[in-house]
Image (cartoon, rainbow, N blue to C red):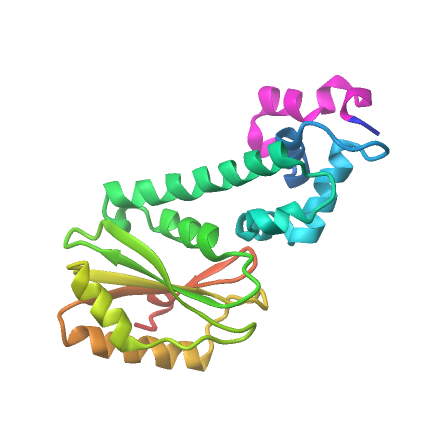
Amino acid sequence: MSIKHLPAATRPREKLLGLGPQALADVELLALLLRTGLPGKGVIELAQTLLDQCGGLAGLLAVTPQELQRIKGLGPAKRAELVAVMEIARRAAAQRLREAPVFDHPLAVKQFVALKLGGNEHEVFAVLFLDSQHRLLRDEAMFRGTLTQTSVYPREVVRRALELNSAAVIFAHNHPSGTAEPSRADEFLTQSLKAALQLVDVRVLDHLVVGRGEVVSFAERGLL
């Protein structure tokens, strides 16, 4: 069934305007962006297909323009709009962290790393470099690995922290398996990085592990 055949009150746009965006399911929000479907496939069905192929909204945020190009029904205009919306979300989250100390917005930090890393098929290790007021200087995906692990070099992290004159850092990496539970290797790596950075007076504020729909904080777990 196409959107125009749905009762007015259940159409995504009318629901959003009447009840707010939180009232819409993921597929309905995406359908609003797509606007039109394909011959024989309504926009709701197209949106659901896209979510299924990408692994939900988290996966969609990690999809590259080249990967979107391989999905039937997404022409240049739709792909451009999706990529633009995803980039706006990332930049908005980063801006918030640049304007105030990260401890003022701990949830925003989790949301930011989820946007940055969630849905990746390979493990990515990122570092958020902070100034003396704990505002974001730079976020960088420093190391990339296989489906299950990546190699992280403390020397490279220390070098980059000194280059940016960073006073503190937050680590973040994803688990492609979907579980956000830290491993023993994650704990060992965190302590190794912390010891290396202490030598140059750079504090480690947290290490965030990104899973599917969840972000685990080392600081909240008392693991730092």
Q: Nearer the viewer, residue 222 or 212?
A: 212
- At horizontal 65% and vertical 52% (from top left) the residue drawn is 54
Residue 93 x/y as whole percent: 38, 43
Highlighted range, magenta: 3-23
- At horizontal 82% and vertical 21% (from top left) the residue drawn is 5
Q: Is residue 207 above or below residue 62?
A: below
Q: Is residue 49 above or below residue 155?
A: above
Query: Which residue is the extreme one toward the right?
Result: 40
Q: Nearer the viewer, residue 119 or 151?
A: 151
Q: Is residue 198 magenta?
A: no
| 109 lies left or right of 204 | right
- At horizontal 30% and vertical 61% (from top left) the residue drawn is 170
- At horizontal 43% and vertical 49% (from top left) the residue drawn is 111
Residue 11 x/y as whole percent: 71, 24
Locate the N terminus and report the quarter of the image it occupies.
Answer: top right
Q: Can residue 24 be seen at all in this image of the molecule? A: no
Q: Can residue 139 be seen at all in this image of the molecule? A: yes
Q: Quadrant of residue 94?
A: top left
Residue 160 x/y as whole percent: 23, 65
Residue 91 x/y as whole percent: 38, 41
Prevailing secondary structure class for the magenta stretch in the rendered image: helix
Q: Is residue 7 magenta?
A: yes
| 179 lies left or right of 116 | right
Q: Quadrant of residue 224?
A: bottom left
Q: Quadrant of residue 122?
A: bottom right
